[in-house]
Every structure is written in structure tokens, then in C-alpha cells.
């Protein structure tokens, strides 16, 4: 890929891996042996067929190749050292280890260990601490950043001083699935269709339709829909049928009735209590029924085309389908696990070729252009209504065809109806905007909150699909416009739901765009130093000092800065990126990681969430993954203290409101020796002093930061650097004045900060509430709140 406006600092620089695609799953299609499976052996500068950088500018074009092997550590074995040696590094590599301790892979720079190997280097650092007993999957991500040719000759795994051979290659065996994990949901609600390439549309026509099929029709699923009891203007899925290599399977009555080749069958119970039940099809496939669980409340009936141990034919584009019924069986969803993306699927789910623009292809071959009207969408769907010859619903004949209902435009529903429905969906945990749009439509039309629970479960299933395509609306509509900005804001306020930055960024951007952009329900990309990106009401920027901050667009009011966490060493920041595994990461120009939130990746993209109170957190489809309002514990020796930074020096201009009288008792402050006091000074704290304060202690750290911690467990409570306007690194002493101010002074006596900005004329004290909120108060009440 070529990244416009971006240049890597040097060949194989770690910064190039910011643009790397996700590491494929070990069982993903597309893996093949290297030219020499034991050592790689790319062909050098004359082997241009190996390098795919046929053109482009050196250090501005990047080609990535993944190499995969397994290192098995026997039970009881001691690992003294582990490294990977390279011959002919071209241009750089990153090593990632997957095991029981790191199911999503070791993060970059784990525990400060450099897991990158740059151009002309020949060995990694010792990575032994990341191996675990049993199987360890080791993946090398190689980047070629200069055309043409790729001369990576060899990579050898060295364990305890000995080179170990790569394991023999074998075709992965599929495992039986349970529930929604890894299933791409194609149809849900009343009825919303998502193609295999991400095209989304509403389809309310009742009848029997081909949902999806392989090109040879040997693996086909059909869906039966009927008008909803909540509102006949919309339809729901009630039954499914499938053709599996000669066997015909029909599923009715909420998954409780299964018919195989015209005969009702009973599925065999497993030995596990409340575990799945099975039925082996005559042609070799497997039916599996998974009862509801606390984690997955659907009644799943799934069909796996190939039993365990069967090799996966590379020419097949799908192998597994699942039908999920809501409790009670009132409506259902259909999902599938697609195989490699190939243009050989058809039906309501589209062509599966990576291009959503052609997914509305009729049987005749005509392609309906987008944006499409609802009438055109219905015409597309009608072309995939099953004929009498191909109908698989043989146990129960189809209902007579009915004309499609008159389309209901969501944005034209009453605002209070949309607000109430969106609130119900948000309260059920539906936060992804496209799913929230569909959920709001369902609940608004039917009044049935079960649709909200069902959509929340689709959201959970989506989080398990590694390469879920981004959603595009076939009618060209915007989900926020469909719900209505006013209705959405009111629903979020009622449900206590936060502002998501991805919903307000321009985009979607291309994968070659470095700038922050929406990506698979979250954010991906970066922000460079001195860059500001606006997202609706808020702007995110890496300021001149390297501090990552969020401000309001109107008035430029500060909301949050990463310096609120005293562990964040931000002054050397060159760029901050949101990666595709859910982390917010700050990097130096050399690729060194300064901080990462959360410390361990989640494996799916995260979004930046801002609460109505200005609280910032990272969230994904499963909820909050990191909250910035509780900084991690600090090493009070000063060794891990934040670095100095040149931030704004202006004092706060706002006058604090007078809150109620503090409920907490004043803490015991230090008792200064009378001879140390100057005129107007009531108390002095100097560098590296510590004072006990009735269950807490105050310390003036070596970095110049004034902080408070709990005495019992050294827990962080507050630091003065929570205000990014403070130049605290130059602080020589902190004083409490007789006029009631807390002041930081430099060595020359210059005032660096003062709280409150103006003296009150009487001494004040420091209070800590039971929630850890720090305030200053005098006999008149609270005079300053550190928020």
C-alpha cells in the first residue's frame, strides 16, 4: 500500500507497522508454504515476483507478509532464552507470540522489550519471558518498504541456544461451533439484511427467499419471512431451510422442529449437561443445536458442511451456516461463516467479492445501482424468491405470496417514538450506530423490546468476526439522520450513553489514510504532533508539547488530556495511533511506545467515548475497555514519574462555582517550623517531602508534581498536573499562603500556579471526600474544586 503524505523514517522502522493489516488467524485460508518452509528463502533483488512493490517511492510504499510457526514448550521444561535470527533482513520485521497468556498476541514493545528487527539487523532481543508451556504460535510480520525485490533469506527460531525446525505443514481441521462466535449475521430483526460485503438494507417482503448459496447450489440457505404480529408493515424471519451436498434440512418452531430429507429427527444429546445436541447428515455434514446460555441467549441450530477432520477444499466459499431463534421463537436471525472471499455466492447476501456496489445483482445479472429506492430494493429481493422447483420448505408449504407493504420512512416517524425506541435499544447495550438505527426502527415499529435484546446479541456476535466488513446503506441513508440527531441526543441522555467520536469523523477513509477515521465500529489511524482533528462537537489533538488532548470545538474548552495519568510519558510523542486491536498508543519517531491504553489489546477496534460530564474512555462493541478517570498507580520514587513538558502557562480564567459545604473533614497538613516561614506563607512543602494526612499522604515528587495517595495501599487520588495549564516540572516548592491559596513556585520565586487564582483573605485547608475528590475550603465553604 502507499500512504499519501507519510514517509517512514528509515528502512524497517517500527512506525511502518502502524499501517500493517491484522495478523490472520492460524486457521484462516490463504496460508501457504514459504519458498523454503524451514527458512523462508525469498529470492533476492532479482526475485521481483516475490516483492509486490512493483512501483512506488521508497519509504512511502509498504508490502506486508506474515510467517507463522509453532514452538511447543513441554511440561516442566525451563526456557532460558528465545530469539529469532534473520539472514538478509529486508526491510523490517515484528514478532508476535500467541499463547494462553496472550490469546490476542503480545503487544508491541511488551514490558519494554523491543520485538522489532530493523534493516540489516540480524536477531531479536530475548523473548523467553513471553513463552508458556504448551503451544506458542509465533508470527513474523515482515515489511518491505522499498521497491523492488525482497531479499529476506532466512529466519531461524533459537530456543535455549538451539535452532528448532519449523513443524510440518498440514491442512487445519474445522472444529464444531457453538453459538454465535465467528458467525457473520446476514439477516436479523424485522428484517434487516447485511450482505457478505457489508451492504445493508431493509427487506419487509413476506415469503421464501434464497438467503445465500454457493455457486454450485450444493450449500444453500433459504429464509421464510412473514408479517410481524407487532406491525404488519414489517416482516420477521420464522423458519429456515438448507441444502447441504444433497441433504435437505428444515428448521421450524423456534429451532425445536428439525426435518432432514422429509423426516422429523431428534438430535443426540452430548455428555455435557445442557450441552449441544448433534445429528450427522447422510452426506457427512453435522447439525448442531446449542441451547441458550447466559452469554448467548439464542437457540442456535447450525449446520457444518464438513465434519471434524475433513480437509477444507480451497475452492469452497462457505462451510457453515447458523440459524438463531430468540427465546420463545417469535423471530430469528441467520448467519454464516464464509470461507475465502470469492465471487461465487448469490442470493439476498450478495456476491461476496469484496465490492458492495454489485451486491444487488438480480438473477438476470442486472445490477441495481446505489443509492437504491425501497422499490428497487424490493425488486432485487423478489428476484431471489424461491421457485417451486428450488423451494426447500417441503414439510410446510409456503404461504401465498403477498404484495410488499407500503414502505415506512424511519425519519418520518414521530420524534418521541424514535427517542423512546432508541432509548430502549441503548439501555439494552446497542451502541454501534448502524445496529442502533435498525434496533430503533424495529422497536419503534413493533413496540417490542425483544428486538433490542436481539440486536444486542447481533452486536456481540459481530465482535467475534475478525474481518467483518464495514456497513454501507443501500439506500444511501445515514443512520444518525434516520434516527434523528435530536432524538438520538435525547435517547443518549436518557440512557446515560456517551458521545462516540467515530460517529462524527469524516469518512470512511481509505485504508491508506493515516489520519484517524472510523473502522469496523471503532477508530483506526493516527494523529501527528501539532495536528488537530475535529469530530463534531469535539476536537482531538496532539499539542505542541506532545500531550494528547480533547477540547470542545466551540470555545476550545479543555475536556481531557492524557497527562491526567501521571504514568503517561507524553513529551516525546511523535504520533498517537488507534490500532486495529483496540489500543490507543503513543509512539516516538523511532517507534518506541510511550504508553498504551488498555495495556493489553482486546483484538477488536476501540472508539473514544466522551460522557456528558466530560469523562473519557475507550469502548468497543462489548463495552468499556479503558477508563481514563482512574489513573494507574505511580512509582513514588520518581523513577516512573512523568517527564517535564512545556505546556500553557496561563492560569485558569474560570471562577469556580460555590458548591455546598464539604462533607469531608480537613486532612492534617504538615506542621512547618516557624523559622522557615516567610511573610504571607502558612506552610511549605519542598521536593521529595512526604506528609501523612489521616489515611492519605501528600508527596512533592521528584518530577515537581504534587500528589496525594492512600496510605493503606498506595492508591492514586490526585495530582496537580491534572490541570494541563500547569508547568509543574519547574516547581521548587509548594506553599499554602495565609490568604488561602495553594501555590507552586519555581527557584526564582515565580508563581507557576495558584489555587484559587485570587486570595480569599483567610487560611484554607485541603479536603478529600470519600469518593477521592480533592477540594480547598475555608470557614465560608468550598473555595476551589480540583476536577
Image: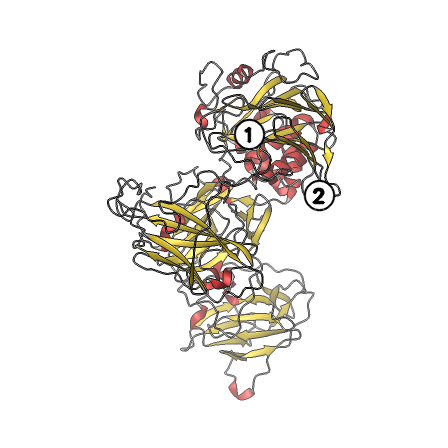
Relative placement, left or right, of 266 versus 659 is: right
Q: Please state if 163 lies on the left or on the right of 737 as rendered.
A: left
Q: Between 595 and 490, which is closer to the camera in this rendering?
A: 595
Question: Relative to 561, is 229 above or below?
Answer: above
Say which residue label 2 marks: 294
- As rendered, which of 97 and 682 lies closer to the eye? 97
* Residue 20 in view (yes/no): yes
Q: What is the x, y in percent for residue 603?
A: 52, 48
Q: Dot 2, how many residues are within 10 Å of its Cα: few (below 14), some (14-19), or many (20+)?
A: few
Disc assigned to residue 482: 1
Residue at 73%, 23% in the rendered image: 264
- Is 709 left, or right, of 546 in this rendering? right
Q: Residue visible at 66% across and 62% down?
A: 771
Q: Secondary structure at mark 1?
A: helix
Nearer-N-terminus badge (1/2): 2
Mark 2 falls on what kind of element?
Answer: loop
**Quick one: quadrant of the N terminus?**
top left
Amino acid at each position: 500500500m502507499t500512504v499519501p503524505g507519510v514517509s517512514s523514517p528509515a528502512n524497517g522502522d517500527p512506525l511502518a507497522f502502524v499501517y500493517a493489516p491484522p495478523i490472520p488467524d492460524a486457521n484462516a485460508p490463504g496460508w501457504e508454504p514459504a519458498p523454503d518452509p524451514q527458512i523462508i528463502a525469498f529470492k533476492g533483488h532479482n526475485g521481483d515476483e516475490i516483492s509486490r512493490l512493483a512501483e512506488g517511492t521508497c519509504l512511502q510504499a509498504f508490502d506486508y507478509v506474515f510467517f507463522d510457526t509453532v514452538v511447543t514448550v513441554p511440561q516442566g521444561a525451563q526456557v532460558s532464552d528465545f530469539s529469532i535470527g534473520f539472514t538478509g533482513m529486508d526491510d523490517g520485521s515484528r514478532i508476535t507470540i500467541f499463547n494462553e497468556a496472550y490469546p490476542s498476541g503480545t503487544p508491541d514493545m511488551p514490558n519494554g522489550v523491543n520485538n522489532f528487527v530493523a534493516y540489516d539487523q540480524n536477531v531479536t532481543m530475548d523473548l523467553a519471558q513471553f513463552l508458556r508451556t504448551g503451544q506458542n504460535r509465533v508470527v513474523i510480520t515482515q515489511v518491505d518498504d522499498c521497491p523492488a525485490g525482497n531479499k529476506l533469506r532466512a529466519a531461524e527460531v533459537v530456543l535455549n541456544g538451539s535452532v528448532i525446525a519449523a513443524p510440518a505443514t498440514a491442512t487445519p481441521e474445522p472444529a464444531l461451533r457453538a453459538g454465535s462466535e465467528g458467525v457473520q449475521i446476514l439477516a436479523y430483526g424485522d428484517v434487516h439484511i447485511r450482505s457478505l460485503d457489508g451492504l445493508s438494507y431493509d427487506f419487509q417482503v413476506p415469503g421464501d427467499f434464497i438467503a445465500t448459496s454457493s455457486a454450485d447450489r450444493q450449500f444453500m440457505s433459504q429464509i421464510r419471512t412473514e408479517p410481524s404480529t407487532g406491525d404488519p408493515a414489517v416482516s420477521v424471519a420464522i423458519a429456515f431451510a438448507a441444502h447441504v451436498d444433497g441433504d435437505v434440512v428444515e428448521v421450524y418452531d423456534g429451532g425445536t422442529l428439525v426435518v432432514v430429507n422429509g423426516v422429523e429427527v431428534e438430535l443426540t444429546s452430548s455428555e455435557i449437561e445442557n450441552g449441544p445436541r448433534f445429528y450427522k447428515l447422510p452426506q457427512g455434514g453435522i447439525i448442531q443445536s446449542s441451547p441458550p446460555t447466559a452469554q448467548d441467549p439464542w437457540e442456535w441450530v447450525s449446520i457444518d458442511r464438513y465434519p471434524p477432520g475433513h480437509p477444507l477444499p480451497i475452492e469452497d466459499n462457505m462451510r457453515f451456516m447458523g440459524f438463531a431463534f430468540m427465546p420463545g421463537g417469535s423471530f430469528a436471525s441467520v448467519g454464516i461463516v464464509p470461507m475465502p472471499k470469492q465471487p461465487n455466492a448469490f442470493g439476498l447476501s450478495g456476491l461476496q467479492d469484496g465490492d458492495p456496489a454489485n451486491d444487488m445483482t438480480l438473477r438476470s445479472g442486472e445490477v441495481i445501482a446505489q443509492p437504491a429506492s425501497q422499490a428497487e430494493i424490493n425488486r432485487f429481493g423478489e428476484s431471489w424468491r424461491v421457485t417451486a422447483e428450488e423451494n426447500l420448505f417441503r414439510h410446510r408449504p409456503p404461504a401465498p405470496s403477498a404484495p410488499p407493504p407500503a414502505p415506512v420512512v424511519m425519519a418520518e416517524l414521530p420524534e418521541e417514538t424514535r427517542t423512546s425506541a432508541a432509548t430502549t435499544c441503548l439501555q439494552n447495550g446497542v451502541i454501534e450506530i448502524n445496529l442502533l438505527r435498525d434496533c430503533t426502527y424495529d422497536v419503534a415499529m413493533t413496540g417490542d423490546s425483544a428486538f433490542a435484546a436481539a440486536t444486542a446479541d447481533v452486536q456481540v456476535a459481530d465482535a467475534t468476526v475478525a474481518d467483518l466488513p464495514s456497513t454501507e446503506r443501500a439506500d444511501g441513508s445515514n443512520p444518525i439522520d434516520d434516527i434523528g440527531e435530536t432524538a438520538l441526543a435525547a435517547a443518549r441522555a436518557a440512557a446515560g450513553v456517551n458521545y462516540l467520536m467515530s460517529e462524527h469523523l469524516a469518512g470512511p477513509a481509505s485504508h491508506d489514510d493515516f489520519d484517524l477515521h472510523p473502522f469496523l465500529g471503532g477508530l483506526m489511524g493516527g494523529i501527528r504532533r501539532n495536528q488537530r482533528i475535529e469530530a463534531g462537537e469535539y476536537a482531538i489533538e496532539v499539542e505542541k508539547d506532545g500531550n494528547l488532548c480533547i477540547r470542545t470545538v466551540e470555545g476550545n474548552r479543555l475536556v481531557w488530556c492524557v497527562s491526567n495519568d501521571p504514568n503517561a510519558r507524553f513529551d516525546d510523542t511523535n504520533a498517537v495511533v488507534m490500532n486495529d486491536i483496540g489500543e490507543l498508543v503513543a509512539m516516538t519517531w523511532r517507534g518506541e511506545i510511550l504508553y498504551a491504553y488498555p495495556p493489553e489489546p482486546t483484538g477488536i477496534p476501540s472508539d473514544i467515548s466522551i460522557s456528558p460530564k466530560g469523562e473519557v474512555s475507550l469502548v468497543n462493541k462489548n463495552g468499556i475497555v479503558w477508563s481514563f478517570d482512574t489513573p494507574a498507580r505511580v512509582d513514588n520514587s520518581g523513577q516512573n514519574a512523568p517527564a517535564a513538558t512545556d505546556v500553557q502557562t496561563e492560569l485558569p480564567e474560570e471562577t469556580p462555582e460555590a458548591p455546598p459545604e464539604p462533607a469531608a473533614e480537613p486532612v492534617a497538613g504538615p506542621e512547618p517550623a516557624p523559622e522557615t516561614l516567610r511573610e504571607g506563607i502558612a506552610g511549605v512543602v519542598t521536593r521529595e517531602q512526604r506528609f501523612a494526612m489521616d489515611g492519605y499522604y501528600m508527596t512533592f515528587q521528584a518530577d515537581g508534581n504534587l500528589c496525594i495517595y492512600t496510605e493503606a495501599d498506595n492508591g492514586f487520588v490526585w495530582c496537580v498536573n491534572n490541570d494541563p495549564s500547569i508547568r509543574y516540572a519547574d516547581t521548587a516548592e509548594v506553599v499554602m499562603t495565609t490568604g488561602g491559596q495553594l501555590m507552586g513556585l519555581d527557584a526564582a520565586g515565580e508563581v507557576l500556579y495558584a489555587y484559587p487564582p485570587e486570595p480569599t483573605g483567610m487560611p484554607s485547608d485541603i479536603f478529600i471526600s470519600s469518593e477521592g475528590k480533592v477540594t480547598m475550603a475555608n470557614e465560608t465553604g468550598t473555595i476551589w474544586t480540583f476536577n
